[in-house]
């Protein structure tokens, strides 16, 4: 059975989902700035950054951090585009 690790992420809280795993180059200050700028500019009020990103198969993604948001907020946002 194939498991989507982003559905069972160890940092995932009840009512949340993984929006994305965002990558940065630790040796490039501009890359790190862009990473935090991207996070800051996300319009989701429930957003939070995790510590360790994982691929769907559970492999650790180096130099990446997961971004979590509320499922309710995500669905509300997506439904606003359907109207």
Image: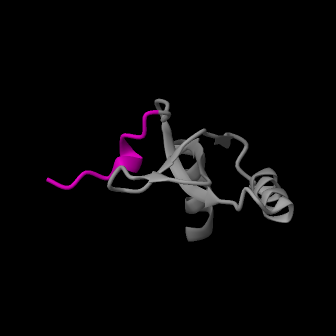
In percent of width and height, residue 62 lies at 55, 54
Residue 12 in the image: above or below residue 75? above
Camera sees residue 51: yes
Q: Quadrant of residue 2?
A: bottom left
Determine the residue positioned at 62% across, 54% down. Answer: 63
The answer to whether one can see residue 83 in this image is no
Q: Residue furthest top?
A: 14
Residue 7 vs residue 26, the one in the foreground: 26
Position of residue 15 in the picture relative to residue 2 (left or right): right
- Residue 9 sits inside the magenta stretch: yes
Q: Main secondary structure of the magenta part?
A: loop
Question: What segment is highlighted magenta in the picture?
Answer: 1-10
Q: Nearer the viewer, residue 64 or 4?
A: 64
Question: Would residue 40 appear left or right of 11 to someone viewing this image?
Answer: right
When asked about the image quadrant of residue 81, the answer is bottom right
Task: Please state if 31 lies on the left or on the right of 3 as rendered.
Answer: right
Furthest residue toward front: 27
What residue do we see at 32% from left, 55% from top? 57
Q: Does residue 54 appear to the left or right of 19 in the view shown?
A: left
Q: Residue at x 35, y 48 (%)?
A: 5
Residue 53 x, y percent position in the rendering = 52, 48
């Amino acid at each position: 059975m194939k498991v989507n690790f982003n559905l069972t992420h160890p940092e995932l809280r009840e009512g949340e989902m993984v929006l994305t795993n965002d990558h940065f180059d630790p040796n490039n200050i501009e890359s790190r700035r862009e990473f935090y700028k991207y996070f800051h500019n996300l319009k989701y009020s429930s957003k939070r950054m995790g510590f360790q990103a994982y691929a769907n198969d559970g492999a650790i993604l180096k130099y990446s951090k997961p971004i979590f948001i509320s499922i309710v907020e995500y669905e509300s946002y997506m439904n606003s585009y359907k109207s």
